[in-house]
Amino acid sequence: MALVRQRVNPELENDILTALIVSTAFVERVVKWYNPKYFTDYTAIVAQWVIEYWQTYRTAPGKYIQNIYNVKKDELEGALSQNISAYLNNLNATYEQAADIHLTYMIEQAHKYFRRKAYEQLYTNGKDLMLAGQVDEAIQLHEQFRDVAQVQSLWENPFDPDVVRQHFADKDADIYSVFRFRDALGQLVGDLEVGWLLAWLGPMKRGKSFWIQESLFRSAVAKQNTAYINLEMIGKGVRDREYARLTGLKEGGLGHNIRLPVFDCYHNQTGECPMASLRTNDIKLRMDGIDAPKPVWGTPGLDEYRICNACRDDAELKKAYYDPDIWYTTYDQKRDYSRKVIETASGGFMRMYGDRIRQITYPAYSVTISDIQRDLNELAYAHNFPIKTVLVDYADIVEAEVPTGDDLSHLNQVWKAMKRTAGEMKALWITGSQTNRKAIDYVTVGQRDVAGDIRKLAHVDVMLSINQTNWEKEDLLTRISTLAHRHKKFTNAQVAVLHQLAIGLPYIDSEWWDLSKTMKDEKEG
């Protein structure tokens, strides 16, 4: 096989070519910047095939690119034909992964690439003309380049019909959304998008790392490539938590009953249900009346009690009659936490959602955001793993870019860098942060309780507080509230989330929660 000359940045050129082949949305966004002279070697030929196909059919060729090659290969020189064949064979072998591009990120990368190539060609051609004494021609070339520069520019008129059409096409294609939490928590937070920085805020040992891990799983389940950076634990501890979350198994828990919280209706517990015909049992849980405290799980005589959620799935009945409360069921762990079980579950997860997770651990205060970004770039290019979600556990123990003895300046540097990098990468960044000491005893964490630099609130797009009283900890309940949301109106409303951290589950189910229930339990306690 003949040798092919060395090319500048062949990885990015190949990535852009692949995106042109597999994504109609990508072609539509970058075709205005395209020039066949911006590609080299076989990529220039294949890219031109793609553009001609799109101009005819208004869709990317996808796997049909192989048919185009089969028709045109006899027109090609031997080395070019062999290189194109090798490229297409590799693309076919990994097509499903290749088709799953990070669209917003690749559009930005393509723009930078095409813009740089345009200016390189202007400089090279203009220099050649000047050296040849063709000054007028060089000036004319520069004047002609104004049209190219205008097209390459990212300035836009928001009221231009083309801009309006593209805006709604992008929204319809859902190119910005990364994932959304389920149930009431998803309603509270909304869709999480690329370029955002989300922070989980809570006192020490309140579950921030578990919530960052849950975000990892939600991102992977949404089939988004996800990078997880942990500065708190070594790899073993991180993996044990992930394997528990994946399988619902507790190490050493074989044969044990594990208590799991479930939502129930308060009217079912008191026996005073206004929709008695729908009620699923005849037993009261609160034997001593509607104002009596809920009995402790395991109290004799309650084995036959059954929860009732008959009104929960009907919007009208729920609004009129459903009053969420909590009861429990048990989970009998019949499988051991073992290598074989974890391997089987891991394989099933990857078959269902794809190869979505990469993670790395660092010692606390050993890396800056720039260090992390370099590792993420390596992951994206050297390992062909374009990243949609980045999780950092957690921001307050990331080192500052410029060392300082001032903790406030340190924190402000780190949080500004995280927000900047989220925008540069077109990725969703998620992290955690501590509250101050006083918040440990508060029923609900507020903006005043952010530890260190209050400017964290200015840098984040979303900040969610993790709230829990001692009684709620025993009840296996956490309350989530919104402290900041740049893109969505928010209130003091709270969502109750059921959990069982013993098997790695910070999120089992969620419902909108009346804080008076928490205050009543505290008073009774």
Image (cartoon, rainbow, N blue to C red):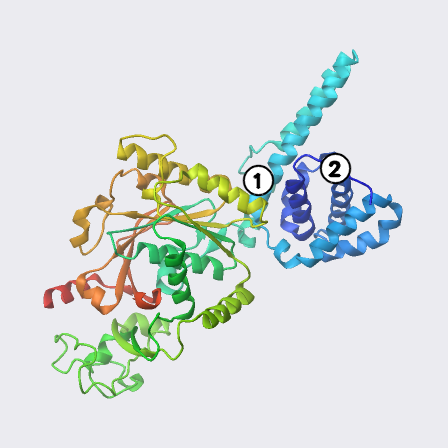
Q: How many marks?
A: 2
Q: Secondary structure at mark 1?
A: helix
Residue 192: x, y in percent? 43, 52
Q: Quadrant of the N terminus?
A: top right
Of 255 and 198, nearer the camera is 255
- The residue depicted at 38 percent of the width and 71 percent of the height is 249
User: Please, which residue is most extreme toward the right here?
Assistant: 74
Tell me if 367 is positioned left or right of 451 in this view: right
- The residue depicted at 68 percent of the width and 29 percent of the height is 118
Q: Residues within 10 Å of mark 1 (few under 14, many from 20)?
A: some
Q: CA distance from mark 1 to mark 2?
A: 20 Å
Three-letter code, disc 1: Glu
Tell me if 5 is positioned left or right of 420 in this view: right
- The residue depicted at 72 percent of the width and 57 percent of the height is 63
Tell me if residue 123 comes above or below residue 181 in the rendering: above
Q: Which mark is residue 108?
A: 1
Residue 116: x, y in percent? 63, 30
Tell me if residue 245 comes above or below residue 332 in the rendering: above
Residue 446: x, y in percent? 23, 49
Three-letter code, disc 2: Thr
Q: Where is mark 2, residue-wise?
A: 40
Residue 382: x, y in percent? 59, 45
